[in-house]
Image (tube, helix red, strand yellow):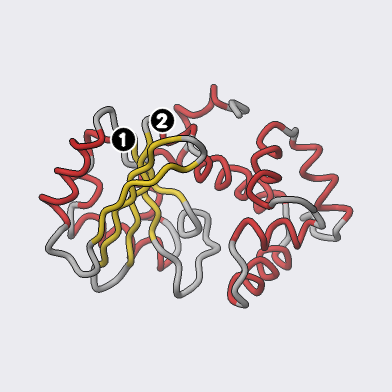
């Protein structure tokens, strides 16, 4: 799970500034995050963007995913209640996911639907982050038709992980399969994309 962890300090996705120079949707997200002070309100919980908008494969219905880390669950619950409860569609729940206590806070602004997903581990160790890193590596090595196929599958109702595995001819549980690709080399990525006719020449 710790592939390329040594480069996390220089990973551009760790700081939301990249959104300012991104595509129109990313720039819109940056302005929304600033306007509502969403990341600033979560500053003690290491808020980190994940999901599809950061890597440019979002659809009109895509949520904004924010990963966070808590030490004491009630601290995050109090902050979310204080800062976000007056926003539309506010909800807060606690679940056990992959044997971990997980806090999920949802709310909306006029522009975006947000989901805060928090566990007691670093955001960069959470599955959603690892999935995004794997997906981004595939996108970096792939041609435009691969990205278009991913978007087509997502718009037809497939989850992101399903769309990637289907496009790449990977079988098994899409969520577990993509996690395994975090340990593979760039050559492995290129070989699979080439096999499926998606390698960027």
Whole-Å distance between the Cαs marked 1 and 2?
A: 8 Å
> Vertically, is 196 above or below 149?
above
Few, some or many C-alpha atoms within 10 Å of disc 2 (few <14, some 14-19, many ≥20)? some
- Residue 159 bears which disc, if any? none
Element assignment for label 2 = loop
* Residue at numbered disc 1: 46
Q: Left or right: where does residue 41 sit relative to residue 47?
A: left
Residue at the spot x=33%, y=46% of the render? 94
> Which residue ends up furthest to the bottom in the rendered image?
156
Would you say 145 lies left or right of 95 here? right
Check whether the beta carbons of the residues at disc 1 and disc 2 lie within 8 A of each other.
yes
Q: Position of residue 163 (x, y in %)?
A: 67, 63
Q: Residue furthest top?
A: 6
Q: Pick the residue in front: 110 or 54.
A: 110
How busy is the neighbourhood of tag 1: few (under 14 within 10 Å), some, or many (20 plus)?
Answer: some
Secondary structure state at the residue bearing disc 1: loop
In the foreground, 81 or 135: 81
Q: Position of residue 105 (x, y in %)?
A: 29, 53
Quadrant into which the C terminus falls: bottom right
Image coords of residue 191 (percent x, y): 85, 45
Residue pictured at 66% horizontal, 64% vertical: 147
Question: To which residue does mark 2 refer?
Answer: 122
Q: Give residue 34's position: percent from left, percent from top.
A: 21, 55
Number of marks in picture: 2
For the point 32% across and 60% down, which residue is it?
Answer: 114
């Amino acid at each position: 799970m710790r592939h390329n962890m040594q480069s996390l300090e220089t990973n551009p996705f760790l700081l939301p500034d990249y959104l300012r120079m991104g595509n129109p949707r990313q720039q819109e997200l940056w302005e929304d995050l600033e306007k509502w002070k969403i990341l600033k309100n979560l500053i003690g919980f290491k808020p980190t963007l994940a999901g599809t908008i950061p890597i440019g494969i979002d659809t009109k219905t895509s949520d904004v995913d924010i990963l966070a880390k808590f030490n004491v669950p009630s601290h995050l619950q109090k902050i979310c209640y204080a800062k976000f409860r007056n926003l539309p569609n506010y909800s807060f729940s606690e679940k056990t996911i992959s044997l971990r206590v997980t806090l999920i806070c949802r709310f909306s602004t006029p522009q975006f639907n947000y989901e805060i997903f928090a566990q007691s581990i670093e955001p960069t160790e959470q599955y959603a982050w690892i999935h995004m890193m794997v997906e981004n590596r595939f996108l970096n090595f792939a041609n435009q038709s691969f990205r278009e196929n991913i978007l087509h599958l997502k718009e037809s109702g497939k989850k992101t992980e399903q769309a990637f595995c289907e496009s790449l001819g990977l079988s098994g549980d899409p969520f577990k399969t993509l996690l395994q690709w975090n340990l593979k080399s760039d050559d492995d990525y290129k070989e699979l994309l080439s096999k499926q006719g998606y390698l960027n020449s």
